[in-house]
Image: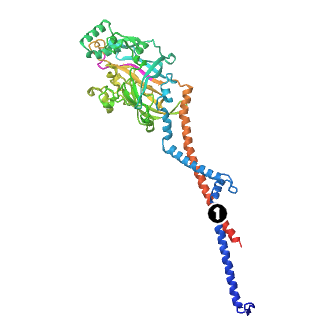
Amino acid sequence: MQIIDPESPEIVINDETAKDCSIKCNECKTNSLRKKSSLNISRNYSKENVVQNQRLFAAVFELTGLREKDGTKEFGTLILLGVMLLLFIISITGFFIMWFTEYYNDTMLAQIILKNNSESTKSWMDPNPKYDTLLKVHIFNYTNIDKYLDGIDDKIKVNDIGPLTYKEHTTKVNVSFNKNHTVTFRDRRTYQFLPEKSNCEEFDNFVLPNVPLISASTKIEKINRFKKFMAVNIINANNERAFKTLTAHEFLWGYRDRIVSMDIGTGSTHFGLLMNRNGTSVDSLQINTGEDDIRKFSTITQFNGQPLLDFWTDQKCNRVDGSDASMFPPHKLNTREDLQVFLQVLCRKIPLHFEKEVTILNNIDALRYRTPLNVFSSPEENPENACYCHNTQVCLPSGVINATKCYNGAPIFPSFPHFFSGDPKIYKDFEGIRPLKELHQTYADIHPRFAFPISGASRIQINIAVHKSSILRRKVDRLEEGTILPLIWIEITSGDFTDEIIDTLYISTFGLNAIQYALKYGTLFACIISFALIVGGFYNLTQKRRQHAIQAQRKTKRRP
């Protein structure tokens, strides 16, 4: 069938032509719809890109329990995300510092460094310290010495009498800070007798070795003939005996003696075993302040102005680089290595060996150190002691040390109390010597962080060796040459703890530990939480982006 357009008679439209036109028209409409749909989708994704940050922060708000409405909280959300990221950075930094460095401990230890006018220095120099030590003295009383010298008794009987207990008040004087991060000072000690803590009285009588006479017997061989002649005459004229009766106070703190006055003894007019300990010390110490290196803290650098002694046969034994026992280098506690203590009474260092961890004073943690049993051993048993033997061919038996040079030529031979850990042949001629570890070994309970002694007992015994010279031979004929006579043994312990001291110990132990644990686990917890918030936020954002894309596609399909 053909249709002739009346206005265009030249164009003939038949059925096939009409059909083709209809198809083309539909294709045009379809293409038009596709372009429109594509344009709409493109516009939708452009909008999605514009509000991408809004949806990210909306996810963060949802995680934190907040709701974003119409983008009004975008600025606040930016701040919140910034805070979260900052928290994560701070927490991860704190976590690394607290778990993998010693920054916290080093910061705490910096408080004990001795700086001029610092709080720790003021406490160290305090003329009225809050803490005093106790000096406990045990005296060996010779109860049958006359019978022994006369050949009646087979052994010398000695009784350990004591303690006589004194409160020891120590202050630092003549303090001088040096440019090389050291400080020089002297100790000033005063003593107060405490009868309530003593088992005898200061004015009780004791039979004791005549120390000035026995010392003179050793030194007289080295003096000139005139002094020797005068000394022999004075000793004989005064009928000086090898043993004499003295009160405890006289023997410890001094009495006038003719032999000492002759300058055969110490150059003084009085003699007392502890006389030089009372008052300002004649010896000066120089220690490292720790300001340049905390590992050197409290280490002695000079004794009486010298870095080395001249008493022993080797430089190693003449070194003074130990502690004065009032404080120690803190880092040595971490590795449990031996601590070195310089004892002026011995003129040498002795080691303290880590034994175990203990709890004292109501669960305060401490590290217990003890003196090794071989401190005074002979070189055969402890080769490191070879340089403490003045003549290696005639070394003393284990248990004593020859400190004659340290005592101006007096034959003083220190040991542990009751010759603990010593060779039994030292006291084979004595009755009443009973060495016990619990009573006679030195130990110290040391604060694990700040390395100062909390409690303990420093124990040493003073003995004198007999040299049977012409002035002494007849007086002690039965005593063997080199017999070592015990005089006293002393024990220095911690005093009574006041409430203020106990509070300080608790703070330095539990308080600082609690802060350390709080920082360690607090930074760990903060790392976990902040990281979880960030991860959760991004996960939530991803999910919302997917949902938004799906919703956008669905809307596009529904449009005509």
Look at label 1 and name its amino acid: Glu
Q: Residue furthest left?
A: 225
Stretch in magenta: 479-491
Can you see residue 406? yes
Q: Quadrant of residue 388?
A: top left
Toward the viewer: 42 or 410?
42
Toward the viewer: 145 or 217?
217
Q: How is the image coloured?
A: rainbow
Q: Residue at x 25, y 14 (%)?
A: 224
Q: Residue furthest top?
A: 237
Q: Main secondary structure of the magenta part?
A: strand
Q: Residue furthest front?
A: 7
246 inside magenta stretch: no
484 inside magenta stretch: yes
From the image, which quarter does the C terminus lie in?
Answer: bottom right
Q: Quadrant of residue 485?
A: top left
The spot of residue 189 in percent (x, y) is 45, 20
- For label 1, count other residues whose C-alpha is less than 10 Å away and answer few (under 14), some (14-19) or many (20+): some
The spot of residue 500 in percent (x, y) is 56, 27
Toward the viewer: 294 or 262?
294
From the image, which quarter does the N terminus lie in?
Answer: bottom right
The spot of residue 506 in percent (x, y) is 55, 32
Q: Quadrant of residue 22?
A: bottom right
117 w.r.t. 207: above or below: below
The spot of residue 516 in percent (x, y) is 54, 40
Q: Which residue is mark 1?
A: 48
Count every numbered label the image shows and give the total: 1
